Amino acid sequence: MNLVFLGPPGAGKGTIAALAKDTLRIPHISTGDLFRYAIAHETSLGKQVKAILASGELVPDSVTIEMVKERLVKSDAKDGFILDGFPRTIAQADALAQMTTIDHVINFVLDRDSIVVRLSGRRMCKSTGRIYHITFNPPKVAGIDDETGEPLIQRPDDQEEAILNRLSVYERQTQPLIDYYRHKGLLRDVDASGAPELVLQSILKII
Ligand code: ADP
Ligand code: ADP
């Protein structure tokens, strides 16, 4: 099952993908996570994209497409995958269509106010990428990861200025993919406003 999770930043794609990957037994491939890993390990890719991620702009298509191409040929993705955060532009979607076929594009639908509340309360464990929310999914001990005991961080791009920029980047560059995939008959709208288990159930029903 080859799935794409599409939707604005903060809609819950990463949270639901982390649940769905265990149910479906396919890997969760997040381009944002891959970039953050490269930044944390100070690779040449990481150095190239660090400032771009902090600003909320998009990494150039050529760089992103190459990274995804290399990831999708790994053996764990041969029976399917959940792509989270890719494609984000029409050029990326065209490139993906050359690489593989997609079964469903899950479009996470959430209003703007809820998006901002989710993003500004998001916290993350830097080493594992585990996602929390200060209100909706708090850790057992405030500011500490439940399993590793490490301090949680707020992503630099979850500060207010970068959030607003990311939303406008989404509207300009990624929203056109909704029509792109609707025309191809692949788009499945999902109400992303409910609790994570409800959102997951809606997706499982669709696929
Ligand atoms: P969110 O899940 O909050 O939308 P991501 O973790 O998916 O954020 O992405 C974080 C950042 O990584 C983006 O703002 C962008 O700079 C970069 N990025 C991730 N995926 C892509 C992509 N497909 N194309 C270009 N840049 C990307
Ligand atoms: P995305 O990957 O789309 O950027 P995330 O999965 O990182 O979104 O979720 C953004 C924030 O919203 C996180 O703090 C997460 O804990 C929270 N969140 C995700 N899904 C839900 C949900 N269904 N209900 C409430 N909060 C959620």
Image: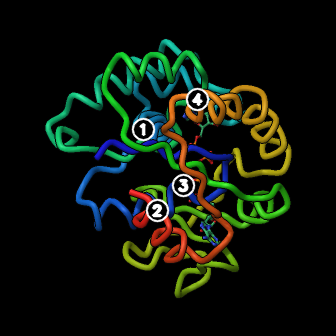
Query: Which mark is on residue 34?
Result: 1
The three-letter amino acid code for the residue at tag 3 is Lys
Circle 4 — which element? helix
Q: Which residue is mark 2?
A: 203
The three-letter amino acid code for the residue at tag 4 is His
Q: Nearer the viewer, mark 4 or mark 1?
A: 4
Query: Which mark is on residue 183?
Result: 4
Q: Dots 1 and 2: beta carbons under 8 Å?
A: no
Q: What residue is rendered at 43% in x and 44% in y?
A: 104
The three-letter amino acid code for the residue at tag 1 is Leu
3D distance between C-alphas at marks 2 and 3: 11 Å
Q: Dots 2 and 4: beta carbons under 8 Å?
A: no
Mark before the other along the chain sequence, 4 or 1: 1
Report how many numbered discs are placed on residues in the image.
4
Could you tell me residue 54's position as x and y percent? 68, 36
Q: Nearer the viewer, mark 1 or mark 3?
A: 3
Q: Dots 4 and 3: beta carbons under 8 Å?
A: no
Mark before the other along the chain sequence, 1 or 2: 1
Beta carbon of the mark 4 residue lies under 8 A of ligand 1: no
Q: Which residue is mark 3?
A: 13
Could you tell me residue 130's position as x and y percent? 46, 63
Does residue 99 appear in the picture of this structure? yes
Circle 1 — which element? helix
Q: What residue is rendered at 68% in x and 69% in y?
A: 193
Beta carbon of the mark 3 residue lies under 8 A of ligand 2: yes
Mark before the other along the chain sequence, 1 or 3: 3
Task: Using the image as rendered, state which of residue 68 and residue 41 is in the foreground.
Answer: 68
Does residue 44 appear in the picture of this structure? no
Task: Using the image as rendered, state which of residue 118 and residue 178 is in the foreground.
Answer: 178
The three-letter amino acid code for the residue at tag 2 is Ile
Above/below status of 148 relative to 179: below
